[in-house]
Image (spheres, grey):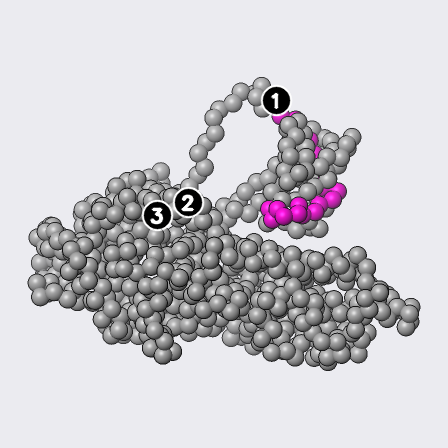
C-alpha cells in the first residue's frame, strides 16, 4: 500500500458547556495524540485538528443553569477545555472553535453547495411549540417521563437515567423547559439530508471495503443502522442559537449542530493553514491524504455514516479509519455529570499536576494508566487503586527503575561516561537484548499503525522489563569486585543499558512525552534523537560522552493520596434522581451476558477439574496475547497455552495455584501443543482474575 502524502487527524469536538472528564480524554483525545506523535516521529506531514463545539441546545441550557448568556458559556468553557488539553500534553496543531467567523462561513458554504446541487430535501412536520415562550422547542427543551424506565426528567432526545434514545413524541406528559407549560404541535418546514439515497454506497464502503481494518464496534453499529433502514435526517432546526441558514425563506432557523459541528474540522484546517501560510485544500480534497477520525462510541454514526455522506456529496475525501473507543467507567459505576460521579481533567490537574510534588511526571502517569486500561474493544474501568498500582509497580518499579539503575551504575562504575564496547567480550545475552530492542520497535510500529495503543504500550514496558532482567543477570556491581579484569564485561553491560535507555526515550515519546524529554535532558541530547528511524540502533549515545547525574523519572503514589480521592468522589457524589418506575423496569448499568443452555449433571461430571501450580511462564513468540505455562498437577506437569498475556506478567504468576480443565482435548496454538485450559473470571472492566482455592492445597486435588 502506497504511503499517504499527508495525514489529517481529528479528535471529536467537545461540547463547550462544562468541564470534561477523563472518560472523554481516554476515548478520543489521548489515543489521537499517541498516534499523531508517532506520525511526527516518522517525519510524516500530519495536521492534528480539534476545537470546541459551541452550538446546539446544550449551550443555552447551560447558560440558563448558570444565569448567564450562551456566549459567556462558550467563552468560559472553551478556554478551560483548551488549557486542560495543553496541561495534559495533548498536542493539537490547532484547537479552534465553531463560533469563529470562518466556521460560520464554511458551514454556510457547505449547506449552500448541497442545497444547490439538489442533495437536500424539504419537509413540513408537526413540532412541539411553547405558546407562552413563543418558540418551537428543540428536543432538549422538552422534558417528560421516560416510557422505558419511568424517569420523570427525561429529555426529548434521551433518557439520562437509562440511556434510551428517545423522540419528543415518546415522552409521557411532556412539558417545555422554557415555561413549564405543556407544549402544542405546530407545523414547521425543515431541510433534510436524505440518507436513504446513499444506503448502497454506505453498505459497500463500510461493510465491504473496510470490513477488515475498522474496529468491530464501529462496523457493528454501522451495520445495525444500515440494516434498520436509513431515514432522512433534518439539517436545520428552529432555534435562536447557532449558524443561520443562508436562505431567505429560512428566517429564524439555524443549522442543526450535528451538521455544522463536523464541518468544524474543515474550518479548523482552514484556520491552521492560514496561520502557517499553507494551502488547506489538499488536506480535504486530495486522495493522497489519509483522514482519520478519533471518537467515542456515541459519535460512531455521525463520523462513520452521516459525515461521510456529507463529504462525498461535497467532493471531499472520506475517512480512512474511524477508531472508536467504548466507555470508561469510574470505581464500579458509569461516569455521570448529573450525579457528579466523575473525575474531571481539571480536578486531576489541580490535585496532582499542579501540586508541589506533581508536574509533568504525573501528566505521564495519567496518560500511562488511561492507555493501559483503554476501552479499545469494551468498556473499561478507572479505579484509584488501579492507577496507584500501575504507576508504582510498572512506571516506578520497571521503567523508572531500569533507567535510574543504569545511570547510578554508570556514574559509579564507568566514571559518568558512556563506556566503550568490547566486541570480543560480547555474549549471547548481549545479542538477545540487541535483538529485543529491534523486535520491540517493529512490534510497536505495527501496533501503532493498527491503532492498538494499549498493546503497543505493553511492548514498551516489556522492553524495560527485559532491560532489568538483563542487568540482573549481568550483575556489573558484583563483577566490579573482581577488579580491572572484569571491566570489559562491565563496560559492555552498561553500554547496552545506556543504548536501551536512548531507545526507550524514542519508543516512549508517543505515550510519555514528558518522560522522554526528561530522559533527553539526562542524556544531554537534542530532540532529534526522538525521530522514529533512530529506534533499534545501538549507536545512539557516543562512547566517552558524559551524562548527567541520575534523577528519578517517576514518584510513587502514596496510599493517603488514593484514599483522599476515593473519599472525595464518594463525598461529592449526588444521589440518582428519583424515578416512578419499579426497580425491575430499570436498565442494568452493565448488560448481562445471555444465559447459556441448561445442561444435565452428567454433562458437568464429564469435566475433570484439578488444582495445579504454575511453575514457569513465558510469552509466546509473535503472539501478544499468549503465555506458555508449565503447570504442576502433582502426578504430571502440563504445558498449557493461555490468552492472558495482556493481563499478567509472566514473572508475577509463577507459584500461583489455578484450576485446570484437565481432560480437554489437546490443541495446537502457535505450534505449541496445549494440554488443558485454566479457568479465569472476568470482571466488569474486562480484567481477568484467577479462579483458585482460598489457600494452597496439594497439586492434583479435584474440584467438584
Q: Secondary structure at mark 2?
A: loop
Q: Would you name the residue on which mark 1 appears?
A: 605
> Which residue is found at the position 12% from the left and 65% from the top?
247
Q: Would you name the residue on which mark 3 appears?
A: 205
Q: Earlier in the sequence, mark 2 or mark 1?
A: 2
> Which residue is found at the position 36% from the left and 76% from the top?
278
Residue 243: % across, % down: 20, 67
Q: Earlier in the sequence, mark 3 or mark 2?
A: 3
Question: Separation of disc 1 and disc 3 at Cα?
Answer: 50 Å
> Which residue is found at the position 64% from the left and 27% from the top?
665
Residue 540: % across, % down: 67, 72
Residue 355: % across, % down: 53, 75
Q: For the residue carrying disc 3, how many other residues have a C-alpha within 10 Å: few (<14), some (14-19), or many (20+)?
A: few
Where 85 sits versus 207, above or below? below
Q: Earlier in the sequence, mark 1 or mark 3?
A: 3
Q: Is residue 509 magenta?
A: no
Bounds of the magenta span?
606-625
Q: Would you name the residue on which mark 2 appears?
A: 211
Residue 453 in sight in this render: no
Q: Nearer the viewer, mark 2 or mark 1?
A: 2
> Which residue is found at the position 33% from the left and 44% from the top?
204
Amino acid at each position: 500500500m502506497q504511503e499517504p502524502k499527508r495525514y489529517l487527524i481529528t479528535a471529536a469536538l467537545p461540547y463547550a458547556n462544562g468541564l470534561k472528564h477523563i472518560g472523554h480524554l481516554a476515548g478520543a483525545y489521548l489515543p489521537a495524540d499517541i498516534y499523531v506523535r508517532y506520525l511526527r516521529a516518522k517525519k510524516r506531514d500530519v495536521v492534528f485538528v480539534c476545537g470546541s463545539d459551541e452550538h446546539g441546545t446544550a449551550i443555552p441550557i447551560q447558560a440558563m443553569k448558570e444565569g448567564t448568556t450562551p456566549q459567556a458559556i462558550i467563552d468560559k468553557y472553551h478556554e478551560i477545555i483548551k488549557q486542560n488539553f495543553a496541561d495534559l500534553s495533548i498536542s493539537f496543531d490547532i484547537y479552534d472553535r465553531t463560533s469563529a467567523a470562518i466556521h460560520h462561513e464554511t458551514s454556510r458554504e457547505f449547506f449552500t453547495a448541497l442545497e444547490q446541487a439538489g442533495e437536500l430535501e424539504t419537509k413540513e412536520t408537526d413540532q412541539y411549540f411553547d405558546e407562552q415562550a413563543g418558540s418551537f422547542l428543540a428536543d432538549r427543551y422538552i422534558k417528560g417521563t421516560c416510557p422505558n424506565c419511568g424517569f420523570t426528567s427525561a429529555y426529548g432526545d434521551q433518557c439520562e437515567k437509562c440511556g434510551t434514545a428517545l423522540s419528543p413524541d415518546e415522552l409521557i406528559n411532556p412539558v417545555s423547559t422554557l415555561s413549564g407549560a405543556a407544549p402544542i404541535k405546530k407545523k414547521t418546514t425543515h431541510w433534510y439530508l436524505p440518507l436513504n439515497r446513499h444506503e448502497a454506497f454506505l453498505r459497500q464502503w463500510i461493510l465491504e471495503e473496510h470490513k477488515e481494518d475498522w474496529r468491530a464496534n464501529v462496523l457493528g453499529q454501522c451495520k445495525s443502522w444500515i440494516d434498520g433502514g436509513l431515514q432522512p435526517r433534518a439539517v436545520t432546526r428552529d432555534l435562536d442559537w447557532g449558524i443561520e441558514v443562508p436562505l431567505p425563506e429560512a428566517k429564524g432557523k439555524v443549522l442543526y449542530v450535528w451538521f455544522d459541528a463536523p464541518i468544524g474540522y474543515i474550518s479548523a484546517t482552514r484556520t491552521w493553514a492560514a496561520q502557517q501560510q499553507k494551502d488547506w485544500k489538499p488536506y480535504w480534497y486530495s486522495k493522497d491524504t489519509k483522514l482519520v477520525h478519533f471518537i467515542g462510541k456515541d459519535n460512531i454514526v455521525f463520523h462513520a455514516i452521516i459525515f461521510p455522506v456529507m463529504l462525498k456529496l461535497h467532493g471531499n475525501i472520506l475517512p480512512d479509519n474511524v477508531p472508536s473507543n467504548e466507555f470508561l467507567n469510574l470505581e464500579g459505576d458509569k461516569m455521570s455529570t448529573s450525579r457528579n460521579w466523575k473525575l474531571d481533567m481539571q480536578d486531576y490537574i489541580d490535585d496532582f499536576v499542579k501540586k508541589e510534588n506533581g508536574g509533568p511526571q504525573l501528566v505521564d502517569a495519567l496518560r500511562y494508566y488511561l492507555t493501559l486500561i483503554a476501552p479499545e474493544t469494551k468498556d473499561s474501568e478507572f479505579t484509584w487503586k488501579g492507577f496507584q498500582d500501575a504507576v508504582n509497580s510498572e512506571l516506578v518499579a520497571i521503567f523508572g527503575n531500569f533507567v535510574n539503575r543504569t545511570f547510578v551504575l554508570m556514574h559509579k562504575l564507568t566514571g559518568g561516561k558512556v563506556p566503550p564496547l568490547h566486541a570480543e567480550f560480547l555474549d549471547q545475552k548481549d545479542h538477545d537484548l540487541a535483538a529485543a530492542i529491534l523486535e520491540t520497535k517493529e512490534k510497536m510500529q505495527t501496533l501503532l499503525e493498527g491503532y492498538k495503543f494499549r498493546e503497543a504500550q505493553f511492548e514498551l514496558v516489556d522492553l524495560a522489563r527485559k532491560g532489568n532482567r538483563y542487568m540482573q543477570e549481568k550483575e556489573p556491581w558484583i563483577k566490579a569486585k573482581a577488579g580491572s579484569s572484569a571491566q570489559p564485561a562491565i563496560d559492555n553491560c552498561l553500554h547496552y543499558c545506556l543504548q536501551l535507555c536512548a531507545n526507550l526515550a524514542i519508543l516512549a515519546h508517543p505515550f510519555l512525552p514528558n518522560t522522554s524529554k526528561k530522559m533527553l535532558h539526562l542524556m544531554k541530547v537534542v530532540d532529534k534523537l526522538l525521530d522514529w528511524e533512530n529506534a533499534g540502533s545501538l549507536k545512539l549515545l557516543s562512547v566517552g560522552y558524559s551524562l548527567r547525574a541520575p534523577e528519578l523519572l517517576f514518584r510513587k503514589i502514596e496510599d493517603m493520596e488514593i484514599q483522599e480521592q476515593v473519599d472525595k468522589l464518594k463525598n461529592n457524589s449526588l444521589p440518582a434522581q428519583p424515578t416512578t418506575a419499579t426497580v425491575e423496569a430499570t436498565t442494568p448499568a452493565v448488560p448481562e451476558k445471555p444465559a447459556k443452555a441448561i445442561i444435565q449433571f452428567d454433562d458437568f461430571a464429564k469435566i475433570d477439574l484439578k488444582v495445579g501450580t504454575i511453575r514457569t511462564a513465558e510469552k509466546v513468540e509473535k503472539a501478544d496475547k499468549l503465555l506458555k505455562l508449565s503447570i504442576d498437577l502433582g502426578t504430571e506437569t502440563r504445558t498449557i497455552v493461555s490468552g492472558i498475556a495482556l493481563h499478567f506478567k509472566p514473572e508475577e504468576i509463577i507459584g500461583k495455584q489455578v484450576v485446570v480443565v484437565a481432560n480437554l482435548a489437546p490443541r495446537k496454538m502457535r505450534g505449541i501443543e496445549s494440554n488443558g485450559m485454566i479457568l479465569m473470571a472476568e470482571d466488569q472492566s474486562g480484567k481477568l482474575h484467577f479462579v483458585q482455592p482460598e489457600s494452597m492445597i496439594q497439586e492434583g486435588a479435584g474440584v467438584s
